[in-house]
Amino acid sequence: MKRRECVPRLAWAAIALLVSGLVGCSQSSTDTAPAPTIEEKILAITPAHAKVNLSFLAGELQDMEVREWVEQGSGRIVVAPKLRGTLKLKNTASDLTVRPISGQITYVDSAGHPIPLSGRRGEATFEFSTYEDRLDPGMATSVGLDLPFPVAALKQKQLREVRLALAYIPTPYREETVSIEVGLSPSR
């Protein structure tokens, strides 16, 4: 008989723990502050389009802008700023093929000094899709840019220029014609 009395007491104890746990959860969820609002800031770079001429490569940096994500109210940077845009290149040589490999952007202040990236953000480098891509005379390619941008340039507002360095392999391109003397003879 003592065994029967023990089971209901355990059941009531389990129900009481469950209910107190649910009440505790509902109270804590109403006590939390609302999540901060994150705002995406877009800053235009002027000009947004710039001509690029390197040796026998011609093209344009297009749609350049800086994006950063900031917590509204506090101004705390949530996602560091990035330079976005597109680099379009065309091989203007008549006798060279080129394999674009990589590129690097350097940000320069009003005094002509490079503006370093802060922390562990590395360098503002990019690669072309594959090493095997090649541009024969007249061919074009493009690459999307999504590169780290220095926070200091936004705070000081002293960005004067963007320098583009490209690594590529030029190789001679030649077309030749061979004439083969032939004749017609009656078939069997």
Image (cartoon, rainbow, N blue to C red):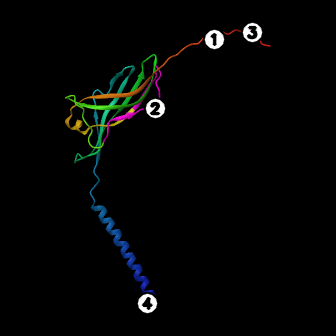
At numbered mark 2, what does the secondary structure look like: helix, strand or loop?
loop
Which is closer to the viewer, label 4 or label 3?
A: 3
Residue at image position (36%, 72%) is: 19
Residue contact between numbered discs 3 and 2, judged by CB atoms under 8 Å: no
Q: Earlier in the sequence, mark 3 or mark 2?
A: 2
Residue numbers of the magenta segment: 121-143
* Residue 146 locus on image (x, y percent): 35, 36
The residue wearing badge 3 is 185
Label 4 secondary element? helix
Q: Amino acid at mark 2?
A: Tyr
C-alpha separation, residue under disc 1 versus residue under disc 4: 112 Å
Residue drawn 44% across and 83% down?
7
Q: How many marks?
A: 4
Q: x and y percent of residue 75 in the render?
A: 23, 45
Position of residue 48 relative to residue 122, above or below, is above
Task: Determine which residue is flagged by label 1.
Answer: 180
Q: CA distance from mark 1 to mark 3?
A: 16 Å
Secondary structure under badge 1?
A: loop
Mark 1 or 4: in front is 1
Q: Is residue 78 or residue 18 the one in the foreground?
A: 78
Q: Amino acid at mark 3?
A: Ser
Q: Quadrant of residue 62?
A: top left
Give the overall secondary structure of the magenta segment. Answer: loop
User: Given the image, on which type of amino acid does mark 4 rest?
Assistant: Lys
The amino acid on which the numbered mark 1 sits, given as a three-letter code, is Ile
Q: Residue 125, labelled with which disc?
A: none
Q: Give the residue pinned by disc 4.
A: 2
Q: CA distance from mark 4 to mark 3?
A: 118 Å
Q: Earlier in the sequence, mark 4 or mark 3?
A: 4
Residue at which label 2 appears? 131
Q: Are marks 1 and 4 in contact (CB under 8 Å)?
A: no
